[in-house]
Image (spheres, rainbow, N blue to C red):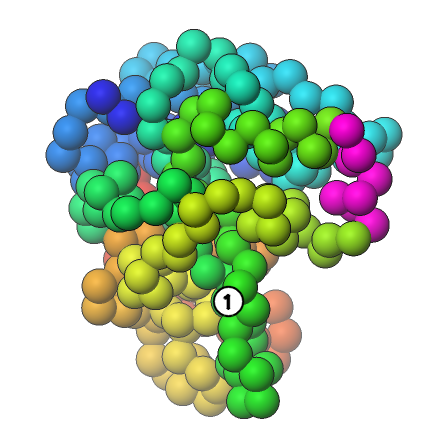
């Protein structure tokens, strides 16, 4: 038995995001699993999803609804979960089998964060994780939680994001192979001006498509435009995988 966990707080994402993530896992994880959504509001979430209260963590004032809440998963105990747990953000789309995320070696697995294409000309990607998808063993990386509770100000002032903070503290860090997790806007959308005539595609080898920032999956499915040149044609494949 393995665990797949997500978090939902506030009103940014509706319950259908949880349901569709669960169904994506059910289609693409070929082993027994427990799917848990930690949330402050379980209303509207499908009965197949196990909803539990958000794990306790002392967050600084003004950061109660920030991604720092993910650090609570590094506590010595997280509800009654045991063993490996794959955390997934709500705004991801599962497009292929994800058993590999539990089989991949290493104590802690995570996406290697992306940077804009133009920024890779003179430097390589930094060794920082992207916490849209990471795997840990419950109770085995407690130094992340303990250090944050001891000095939360350091996490806020010395690190740009919660994912940079956790990456700096975990033991046995491994990055997923690049093809497994792809950014929708970095890897699926063709570069300008081709994005105006070629629809987004799923790169070969992708298991999870990550929708960080805008657009969200429902926006990308319909086609999205933020500026004259930042636009995408409708991605019809989202409806096939996010349902």
Q: Residue at x 20, y 36 (%)?
A: 29
Magenta extent: 150-157
Q: Residue at x 48, y 86 (%)?
A: 192
Circle 1 Cα neighbour tier, 10 Å, few/some/many (<14 / 14–19 / ≥20) = many
Tell me residue 198's x, y (percent): 34, 80
Looking at the image, which residue is at 51% across and 54% down? 130
Q: Nearer the viewer, residue 25 or 190?
A: 25
Q: Quadrant of the N terminus?
A: top left
Q: At 26% from the left edge and 47% from the top edge, which residue is drawn? A: 104
Judged from this view, the residue extending furthest toward the top is 80
Q: Residue 126: x and y, percent? A: 56, 69
Answer whether residue 15 is visible to the viewer in this image.
no
The residue lying toward the viewer, choosing from 148 and 200, is 148
115 versus 241 height, above or below: below
Is 125 positioned to the left or the right of 107 in the image? right
Q: Quadrant of the C terminus?
A: top left
How many numbered marks does the figure carry?
1
Query: In this orientation, does residue 187 appear?
Result: yes
Quarter assignment of residue 41: top right
Q: Viewed as shown, does residue 58 lie left or right of 143? A: right
As rendered, which of 150 and 3 lies closer to the eye?
Answer: 150
Q: Estimate the x, y position of residue 57 in percent, counting from the top left.
A: 68, 22
Q: Main secondary structure of the magenta part?
A: helix
Quadrant of the rendered image containing residue 16 = top left
Along the horizontal axis of the image, is 125 left or right of 152?
Answer: left
- The answer to if 152 sits in the magenta stretch is yes
Height in image: 96 above or below 192? above
Q: Which secondary structure lies at badge 1? A: loop
The picture places residue 123, in percent across and down from the top left corner, at 57, 83
- In reply to whether residue 158 is colored magenta, the answer given is no
Q: Which residue is mark 1?
A: 114
């Amino acid at each position: 038995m393995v665990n797949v966990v997500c978090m939902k707080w506030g009103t940014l994402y509706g319950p259908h995001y949880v349901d569709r993530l669960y169904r994506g896992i059910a289609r693409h994880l070929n082993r027994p699993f427990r799917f848990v959504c930690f949330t402050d509001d379980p209303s509207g979430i499908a009965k197949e999803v196990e909803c539990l209260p958000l794990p306790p963590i002392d967050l600084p004032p003004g950061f109660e609804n920030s991604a720092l809440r993910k650090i609570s998963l590094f506590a010595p105990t997280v509800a009654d979960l045991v063993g490996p747990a794959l955390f997934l953000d709500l705004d991801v789309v599962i497009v292929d089998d994800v058993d590999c995320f539990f089989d991949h070696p290493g104590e802690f697995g995570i996406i290697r964060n992306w940077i804009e294409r133009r920024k890779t000309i003179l430097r390589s990607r930094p060794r920082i994780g992207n916490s849209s998808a990471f795997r840990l063993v419950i109770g085995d990386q407690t130094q992340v939680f303990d250090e944050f509770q001891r000095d939360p100000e350091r996490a806020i002032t010395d690190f740009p994001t919660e994912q940079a903070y956790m990456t700096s503290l975990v033991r046995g860090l491994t990055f997923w192979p690049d093809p497994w997790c792809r950014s929708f806007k970095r890897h699926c959308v063709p570069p300008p001006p081709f994005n105006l005539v070629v629809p987004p595609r799923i790169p070969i080898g992708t298991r999870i498509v990550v929708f960080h920032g805008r657009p969200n999956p429902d926006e990308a499915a319909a086609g999205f435009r933020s500026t004259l040149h930042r636009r995408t044609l409708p991605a019809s494949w989202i409806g096939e995988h996010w349902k």
